Amino acid sequence: MTSIQTDSFAEQLDATAREVAALLESLLSPVPLAGEIARPDQLISAMRHGVLNGGKRLRPFLVIESAKLLGVPHQAAARVAAALECIHCYSLIHDDLPAMDDDDLRRGQPTVHIAFDEATAILAGDALLTLAFDILSAPETQLPAEVKLTLINQLARAAGVGGMVGGQTLDLHAEQTRPDEAGILRLQAMKTGALLRYACAAGAIAAGADSETLARMTRFGEVVGLAFQIADDLLDVTSDAATMGKATGKDAGRGKGTLVSLHGNDAVRSRLDCLVEEAASLLDPFGARAAALKQAAKFIASRDR
Amino acid sequence: MTSIQTDSFAEQLDATAREVAALLESLLSPVPLAGEIARPDQLISAMRHGVLNGGKRLRPFLVIESAKLLGVPHQAAARVAAALECIHCYSLIHDDLPAMDDDDLRRGQPTVHIAFDEATAILAGDALLTLAFDILSAPETQLPAEVKLTLINQLARAAGVGGMVGGQTLDLHAEQTRPDEAGILRLQAMKTGALLRYACAAGAIAAGADSETLARMTRFGEVVGLAFQIADDLLDVTSDAATMGKATGKDAGRGKGTLVSLHGNDAVRSRLDCLVEEAASLLDPFGARAAALKQAAKFIASRDR
């Protein structure tokens, strides 16, 4: 029974990933839109390389399922999901740059600055970030104007100086500043948590939901974000132990604290279980309709990817 | 008489620059807004370094004067102007990076990646680009929701793959591709023209102006953009001739074509005069109220800066 559910969840995740990829592909067409002058081949190719890379589209899945739960038309939800994925993909392109994490490979493919060059990678990231706001504000995103403005404003705040980009800055300096537990939690809430929180809140915003439902979905997104990060930190330790024969992971080894390095594997595994339970209970009022979102939270906590 | 007008124009430009700088300073406060988690000092400092640099704020001036001409409330216009300036400043920070133009100085100050580091400069640019859309979408920008969405959408298209960032990509490859006159004009219309065009169109969009007025202001912005670029190319030749004792300028010397390198100084000076005349005649229907905008076009064509 559990295995059948998991299989059908995996199929659902995969189907959504394919749909979002198709939408992103059409949004990254070489044909200029009204108000644009031309879309240079080189730049569009670099943007496509950074976006159409077989990603699991976890954030889009959360947007689309949260939106479905609250009755948002699917087409509008898919566009919000695509906008958020543009933000996520731009952040990976910039993160991979030599001045940042200096990664040559992502998902087994050369990163954008390797496949193209550094300048093009910077510009492709900039263009994807800009495109996210084009997508949300365009007439094709059929939602009430005030709702679209809230989606835009909250995305900007989740992604910008007070969210993801701010978190990346804190992370850059974490080796020197050695944040305490509160500092680590803040860093993680910004760097990875803010977009996941937005993904789950976006459905409620798009639905024009009441403040209690918005708060519930926002908290669900926070919990998913915390679970994502702990699972990531655990994976970091485990994969290093398996492949590199040492017990501490990449981030911990660099001197960046994580909850794992502070409290040990067993304690954070218990914490992870509690988070999955909290995520599920937050969705209880929605009954069986929330099954996919509950499974998504479980999947994110397991990090089978 | 002319000299008195010019002096009062210079004062007006300066007063607007001070006002816009004060607004930008308040928008770059270290205090997080609703929906933000924290604003890291390092990142806010780098953003402020890139923005609060004594710029002339030409684009904000064009926004504010176009908006005033068409009856847009000043406070809303100032916020649109500040958003556009965030985009302009982010583009300068990223342009100055080692992988791009590799400039150490801007306005006599160390560029952001010199004053901080490369990673912080990339992130400061990203955060400013994101902030522009926060500013436009926030409730404090008191304009009708549909108007704000159009301002956001047109800004995204002016700044993104089909506008400024696309133009920067074309410029990166101009030494190899050696564009013909049409190619040079397209590159320039994207790289520098798109934001100037937006600056002048934004007032009409914000005013909810009729399509004829919007087309007139958009054309005015295009003409100003063309004049800006020609003046820049002329300055490039002239300043090089004066300071480096050679007749060809930096861009022409790098093998990037300009209208100056194609047609010579005298021909483009005549073209510049025609553009200033066209700009003025486009504003004739507004009578004396358009004096500041006409002077701005003249100032931009003279490049006394």
Image (cartoon, coloured by chain):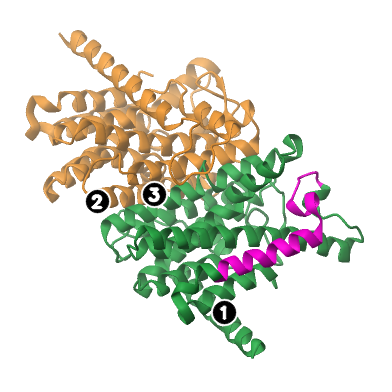
Chain colours: A green, B orange
Taking depth in this image into account, of A215 and B259 the one nearest to the observer is A215
- Does residue A273 sit above or below B165 in this rendering? below
Helix, strand or loop under label 1: helix
- Does residue B103 appear to the left or right of A134 in the view shown? right
Which of the marked residues, 1 or 3, is nearer the chain's N terminus?
1
- The kind of residue on which mark 1 rests is Asp
Q: Could you say which disc has been placed on residue A14 in the image?
A: 1
- Residue shown at 24%/51% (left/top)? B145
Taking depth in this image into account, of A23 and A228 the one nearest to the observer is A228
Residue A81 seen in the current view: yes
- The kind of residue on which mark 3 rests is Asn
Provide the residue designation for mark 3.
A153
- Magenta stretch? A254-280
Instruction: Assign the magenta stretch its main secondary structure.
Output: helix
Is the Cβ of the residue at disc 1 closer than 8 Å to that at disc 3?
no
- Name the chain letter of the residue that bears numbered label 1: A
